Amino acid sequence: MNKIQKLGCACEKPTSNYTEYRSSELGIDHTNGREAEVSIQQCKLCQRIWIRYFVEFESFSKSGRWYKGIVSKKDRPNIIPENAVEFLESLEWYVFGGSYFESTGEFGQGKLNVDL
């Protein structure tokens, strides 16, 4: 399990509408027809890098869900859209939310619920 220490930065708060990130698209995860958007976000305050995974099934209302977790600089080059779920599941904690959970964000760990 990847241990990531919490620093108390605003980017760790699950419910924050925190916008102080530099974001870049990593790509689309086509696994099981998900068409999930995978992006990299770097906090402008603490400089930590997050992987954000967003999936929504257009034919189902309230199916939108996102997960994000901190990745180390050494692990970052190894993450591609197709292994982002596996990486997030390996973390000690991540943040998740979306209309599927009727949540603006909370802490979680373990298996991601990304398929129908």
Image (cartoon, rainbow, N blue to C red):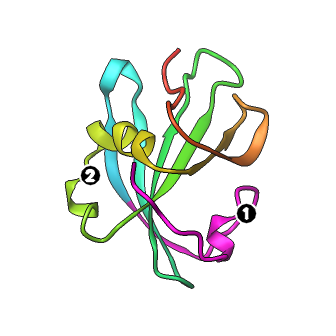
**Mark 2, secondary structure of its residue:** loop
Q: Are marks 1 and 2 in contact (CB under 8 Å)?
A: no
Q: Residue at x 71, y 47 (%)?
A: 106
Dividing the picture into quarters, in which one does residue 16 lie? bottom right
Q: Residue at x 62, y 70 (%)?
A: 11
Q: Residue at x 44, y 59 (%)?
A: 3
Above or below residue 109? Residue 10 is: below
Dividing the picture into quarters, in which one does residue 8 lie? bottom right
Write down the residue under mark 2. Answer: 79
- Where residue 36 appears, as percent x and y from the top left, is 43, 35
Magenta range is 1-24
- Where residue 58 appears, as percent x and y from the top left, is 57, 22
Dividing the picture into quarters, in which one does residue 81 lie? top left
Name which of mark 1 and mark 2 comes first in the sequence. Answer: 1
- Where residue 46 appears, as percent x and y from the top left, is 53, 83
Q: Main secondary structure of the magenta part?
A: loop
Amino acid type at image mark 2: Ile
Amino acid type at image mark 1: Asn
Write down the residue under mark 1. Answer: 17
* Horizontal relation, residue 57 to residue 19: left or right: left
Mark in the foreground, 1 or 2: 2
- Density class for disc 1 (Cα within 10 Å; few <14, some 14-19, many ≥20) is few
- Where residue 74 appears, as percent x and y from the top left, is 24, 68
Nearer to me, 115 or 90: 90
Total number of numbered labels? 2
Residue 13 lies in the magenta-colored region: yes
Residue 60 lies in the magenta-colored region: no
- Whole-angstrom CA distance, mark 1 to mark 2, is 25 Å
Rendered image: mark on residue 105: none
- Density class for disc 2 (Cα within 10 Å; few <14, some 14-19, many ≥20) is some
Nearer to me, 89 or 98: 89
Above or below residue 108? Residue 39 is: below
